C-alpha cells in the first residue's frame, strides 16, 4: 500500500471517529435539554389550590396570555390536543409565535378520519416545521369491536356509537395524557350547550387532576375565522363545502349556514348531549 493511500485511510478513520464523537455530544445535549425542561416544569408546577386561584385570574386574560402562562409554566409537559379544527389551528399558530421550542401538539387518529384532515395535518407539519405526536387506538380493541359489532356499528345505537368513540378516541387520549401534566384544547363556550360552563383554566379530575387549558373558551366563531384569515393559517378544506365541525368521516356531514354547527356530527342521534367522551367530566356529573 502506498504512503498516500495509507494516509487517506488514517484520515478517513479519524474523520469517522470525530463524527461519532459529534453525534454522542448532540445526543447528550438533547438528553440534558429534555431533562432540564422536564425538571423546570416539574419544579414550577402549581398545586391544586394555586391552580384554583390562577383559574380565576386567567378568566379575564387573552388567549395569547393564557397560552403564554401555560407554556412558561409547564413547558413540554403540556400539549395541545388537536383534531385540526379551526380553533386548533389558531392555537397552533399562536403557540408557535409564543415559543416554538415549547410547542407540543398531539392528535388522535381514529382510523376513520377524512382525507382532508390528513392533508391538513401534513400541511401544518410542513408549514411550522413541527412534529405531531399521533396516538392510534389499540389494535386488539378495534379488532374485537368490529368483529362483534361490525364496521358501521355507530349507526345502530347510541351505545354502539359511544363504544366506538371510547375505543377510537377516549382510550388513546388517556394514553396521551398519562405522559403529561396538562393539556390544551380548542373548546369554546358557544359551540354547544354542553360547553357553556367551561373555564379557561380547569383541573381535569377525569385525568388525575392535571390542568386543562381552554384559551379560546370565550371566542366566537367569527373571531376564530377572522384570526385564520388575517394570519393566513391553513384550515380543513371541508369547511369550504359546508362542514362546520369535523370529526370522523362516517359521523360528520355538511350543514346549512343557519343550522346548529354541531348538527352535522352524529346527525342521526337526537338530543343535546352529542359528545364523544373526550371532554366529559364524570366527577362533576355533567358535560363540560
Ligand atoms: S366519531 Fe364515529 S367513527 Fe369516530 S370514533 Fe366516534 S363513532 Fe367511531
Image: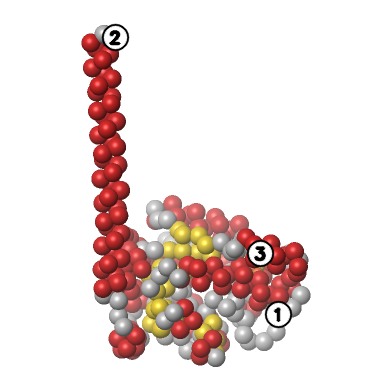
- How packed mark 1 is, by other alpha carbons closer than 10 Å (few <14, some 14-19, many 20 or more), is some
Residue plotted at (45% across, 58% down): 132
Residue 193 on image: x %, y %: 56, 87
Q: How is the image coloured?
A: secondary structure
Residue plotted at (30% across, 42% down): 23
Q: Mark 3 and mark 2: span between their CA atoms?
A: 63 Å
Q: Nearer the viewer, mark 3 or mark 2?
A: 2
Q: Nearer the viewer, mark 3 or mark 1?
A: 3
Q: Mark 3 and mark 1: span between their CA atoms?
A: 18 Å
Whether label 1 touches label 2, CB < 8 Å? no
Residue 214 on image: x %, y %: 42, 78
Secondary element under disc 3, as helix, strand or loop, is: helix
Residue receiving disc 1? 158
Nearest the camera: 203 or 64? 203
Q: Is residue 264 visible?
A: no
Q: Nearer the viewer, mark 1 or mark 2?
A: 2
Residue receiving disc 2? 1
Residue receiving disc 3? 142
Q: Mark 1 and mark 2: span between their CA atoms?
A: 79 Å
Amino acid at each position: 500500500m502506498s504512503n498516500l493511500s495509507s494516509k487517506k485511510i488514517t484520515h478517513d478513520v479519524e474523520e469517522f471517529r470525530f463524527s461519532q464523537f459529534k453525534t454522542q455530544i448532540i445526543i447528550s445535549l438533547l438528553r440534558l435539554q429534555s431533562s432540564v425542561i422536564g425538571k423546570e416544569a416539574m419544579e414550577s408546577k402549581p398545586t391544586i389550590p394555586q391552580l384554583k386561584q390562577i383559574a380565576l385570574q386567567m378568566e379575564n386574560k387573552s388567549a395569547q396570555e393564557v397560552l403564554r402562562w401555560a407554556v412558561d409554566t409547564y413547558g413540554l409537559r403540556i400539549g395541545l390536543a388537536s383534531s385540526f379544527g379551526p380553533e386548533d389551528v389558531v392555537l397552533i399558530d399562536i403557540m408557535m409565535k409564543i415559543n416554538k421550542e415549547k410547542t407540543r401538539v398531539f392528535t388522535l387518529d381514529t382510523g376513520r378520519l377524512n382525507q382532508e384532515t390528513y392533508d391538513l395535518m401534513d400541511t401544518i407539519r410542513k408549514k411550522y416545521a413541527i412534529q405531531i405526536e399521533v396516538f392510534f387506538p389499540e389494535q386488539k380493541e378495534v379488532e374485537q369491536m368490529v368483529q362483534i359489532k361490525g364496521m358501521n356499528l355507530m349507526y345502530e345505537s347510541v351505545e354502539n356509537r359511544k363504544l366506538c368513540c371510547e375505543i377510537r378516541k377516549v382510550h388513546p387520549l388517556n394514553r396521551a395524557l398519562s405522559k403529561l401534566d396538562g393539556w390544551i384544547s380548542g373548546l369554546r363556550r358557544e359551540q354547544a350547550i354542553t360547553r357553556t360552563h367551561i373555564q379557561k383554566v380547569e383541573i381535569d379530575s377525569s385525568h388525575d387532576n392535571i390542568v386543562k387549558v381552554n384559551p379560546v373558551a370565550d371566542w366566537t366563531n367569527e373571531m376564530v375565522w377572522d384570526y385564520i384569515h388575517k394570519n393566513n393559517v391553513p384550515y380543513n378544506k371541508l369547511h369550504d363545502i359546508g362542514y362546520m365541525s369535523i370529526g370522523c368521516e362516517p359521523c360528520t356531514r355538511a350543514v346549512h349556514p343557519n343550522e346548529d354547527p354541531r348538527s352535522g356530527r352524529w346527525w342521526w342521534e337526537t338530543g343535546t348531549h352529542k359528545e364523544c367522551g373526550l371532554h366529559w367530566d364524570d366527577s362533576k356529573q355533567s358535560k363540560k
